[in-house]
Amino acid sequence: MTAARAPLAVTAELSLQAATGEAVTVTADGAVVTVTLPHLRLHPGRLGLPVDRKGREAMLARLQRGLQVVDLTLQVRVRETLLAQLAPHSQPGALSRLLGLGPLQLRPWSVLRALLRRR
């Protein structure tokens, strides 16, 4: 019989620099890791994400499997607005499937507001 694993509790605060020179912040508090972008106009390739659909879907599926192992949730924000979440049991919505974002749960209205917001 295998012992049940306790969820991983993470505490962190880091600031990374995108290829554009802009700050991307990563914070973690307990079971939630949050990536905060300055705006949505950062190209996925410049953030180190695969640009092609298959690569993006595969990377997000691997990331979700890793989140399942440690029972963590990943949130993506622009400033204070939650745009997307990837949790151990996330299921994609129609927009995620259309954009090839695998199991990432998008908040369409928040994404639209972030796209229209001035820097």
Image: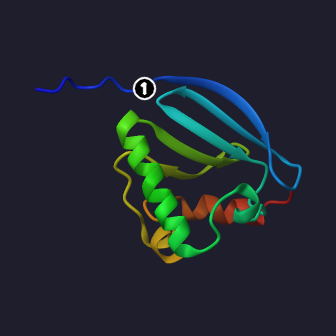
- Secondary structure under tag 1 reads loop
Residue 49, compared with residue 74, is above or below; it is below
Where's residue 61, x and y in %?
43, 58
- For the C terminus, the quadrant is bottom right
Residue 82, compared with residue 45, is above or below; it is above
Where's residue 46, x and y in %?
76, 60
- For the N terminus, the quadrant is top left
Residue 104 visible in rendering: no
Amino acid residing under circle 1: Leu
Tell me how the rendering is colored.
rainbow
Residue 73 visible in rendering: yes
Query: Could you tell me which residue is drawn at 60 percent across and 74 percent down?
Result: 52
Q: Residue furthest left?
A: 1
Query: Could you tell me which residue is drawn at 22 percent across and 25 percent down?
Result: 4
Report the side of 47 relative to 1 (left or right): right
Residue 17, compared with residue 13, is above or below; it is below
Query: Could you tell me which residue is drawn at 36 percent across and 42 percent down?
Result: 68
Where's residue 25, x and y in %?
73, 38
Query: Could you tell me which residue is drawn at 49 percent across and 77 percent down?
Result: 98
Report the side of 91 relative to 9 (left or right): left
Q: Number of numbered discs present?
A: 1
**Mark 1 Cα within 10 Å, few/some/many (few <14, many 20+)?**
few
Where's residue 77, x and y in %?
65, 47
Task: Residue 41: name its quadrant.
Answer: bottom right
Residue where numbered disc 1 is placed = 8
Report the side of 20 relative to 101 (left or right): right
